[in-house]
Amino acid sequence: MREPTVLIVEDGDEYRENLTRFVPGPTWLQARSASAALAVLSEQPVDVVYLDMRFDRIPREDLVGDHAEATRQHNGDPVRGWRYLENNQGLFILDALARAGHRELPVILAYDFGREATRWKHLHRRYPRLRWVPDAVTPTEIRATLLECLRRD
């Protein structure tokens, strides 16, 4: 049996560096934006996506989501609109993946929903293959979550 291929989607290198070092086994790929992730997914099979939530280190033009709508939702403040897109970019990328035909692809979102049970419930209902891990997660917990995602295939 081949090792799984995991696509890490993050705007830095922290997850890639830590995962490749502390969770050996999978083939780790990396993309820094929704468009880059979609390009990887069009080129090769991926078993799981490991997705960061916050993207504040990429150019604004690489963010997905409607900035005008986010600005309207934040009382016409464009700065708060950009901040909203950056802070929730993982969810916008998740939606972009689903709209591009990857709804069944398991995704592990690096975000702590421990205090946001209602938000998690709604997200999980919409994306049943979605799992989450907090930032303070051990390699053993990450491996267990990866295995859980792969068992569902």
Image (cartoon, rainbow, N blue to C red):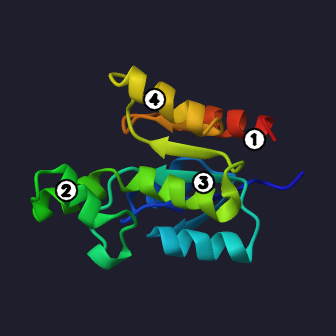
Image quadrant in which the C terminus is located? top right
Q: CA distance from mark 3 to mark 2?
A: 31 Å
Determine the CA span between mark 4 and mark 3: 18 Å
| Mark 4 residue crowding within 10 angstroms, few (<14) / some (14–19) / many (20+) | some
Q: Nearer the viewer, mark 3 or mark 2?
A: 2
Looking at the rendered structure, the kind of residue marked 2 is Arg
Residue 14, how many percent across, how many down? 38, 58
Could you say which quadrant of the image residue 85 lies in? bottom left
Q: Residue under circle 4?
A: 120
Instruction: Tell me the residue at 40%/66% (across/down).
Output: 64
Q: Which residue is mark 1?
A: 150
Mark nearer the N terminus (4 vs 3): 3
At mark 1, the secondary structure is helix
State the SS at label 3: strand
Q: CA distance from mark 1 to mark 2?
A: 40 Å
Q: Classify residue 97 as left or right of residue 73.
A: right
Q: Which residue is mark 3?
A: 49
What residue would you read off at disc 2? 72
Callout 1 amino acid: Leu
Front position among marks 1 and 4: 4
Disc 3 crowd rating (10 Å Cα; few below 14, some 14-19, many 20+) is many
